[in-house]
Amino acid sequence: MLAFRLAAAGAGFLMLLAGCATRSGDVKPLPSDPAAFANLSCQALYTEAEQVQRRAADVAYTMDERVGNNVIALGVGATVFWPALLAMRPDGPDAAELGRLRGRYDALQLALVQRPCPPQPDTLSAEQMATMPLQPGERLVYEERQGRGPARELSLRLKTVRREQLEFQAQLPGERAPVRWLQDAAGNIAPPPGGEAVLYWTRLLRPGMQLGDVLAGELRSTTGDQGRLRGQVIATGVQTGFGRPFDAAVIELYGDVPFRRHTARLDGVMVVDRKSGVLLRLELRSGNADFELRRRLLRVEAAD
């Protein structure tokens, strides 16, 4: 009887927190002094602002994900998950960090104006382009198996390299004409067009991944289905099998995807270049065949 009362009290507390947990949009920036950045060059200010913005986006995503899933994730009882319950408070650590990051970003933007610094160029400099493992016009050719279907070819020809984005011309299976394929510099993919179902991942990868980093994001299909994807960087190192060095990160993946009225387990491995986000290998295994995918880079073809 006592256990039931404790569980009921815990459930009531969870429901109370569900109503008051802070969403990222409600967090106000904490003031930060632009004078703290007086000795930084314009390029250093640009770099710091980008890093702060990326970290703020990660924290905001984590906060909003928690608000959407708190009752399910913490439904076992308040005594077991007390640290996580505290993190859901309006003054929890994520909210405090996001407030600091937003204040720091505002101060950096003010420092850029006070300097004054010119607008940051959208494209990479010649020096930055020289460090990239892939150049505009080159073509990535993959072997792909979707579900339990036969092997087919996917090709991506690099069109443009921007500061935070790579644009490819993709020849997707089932499409007669090439389509636009966008990914950010870490390798996360924007929703691709396509006649057949295409799997892509969002919010999962981030720049500068290091050994042991824990990742979280979403695995989506152009059919509208989506699952939760998590991972950890288990190895890093240079791969030279394609005629150029790729600074690879090996990521062990796991998660869950929709399957009929329930969910199915998903696991696998992903290998990406940390400099450009270029995918080198992907294996996804699941009880839901729609979320099974094997894709490996076969070769890199020179520009025409």
Image: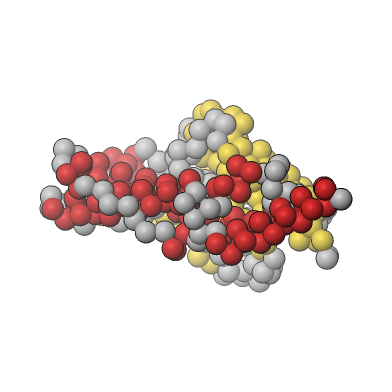
- In the depicted view, which residue is nearer to us: 22 or 101? 22
- In the depicted view, which residue is nearer to us: 86 or 30? 86
The residue depicted at 37 percent of the width and 59 percent of the height is: 28
Colouring style: secondary structure
Query: Would you place residue 227 above or below residue 86 in this image?
Result: below
Q: Is residue 215 visible?
A: yes
The residue depicted at 61 percent of the width and 31 percent of the height is: 234
The residue depicted at 82 percent of the width and 47 percent of the height is: 3
The residue depicted at 44 percent of the width and 63 percent of the height is: 25
| 82 relative position to 276: left or right | right
Percent across and percent down for residue 238 are 51, 29
| 27 relative position to 187: left or right | left
Percent across and percent down for residue 176 are 61, 70
| 68 relative position to 39: left or right | right
| 268 relative position to 115: left or right | right
Query: Would you place residue 250 above or below residue 9 in this image?
Result: above
- Number of disc labels: 0
Percent across and percent down for residue 266 are 75, 49
Percent across and percent down for residue 170 are 55, 60
**Splitting the image into 4 quarters, where does residue 233 fall?**
top right
Residue that sits furthest to the right in the current view: 1
Q: Is residue 283 visible?
A: no
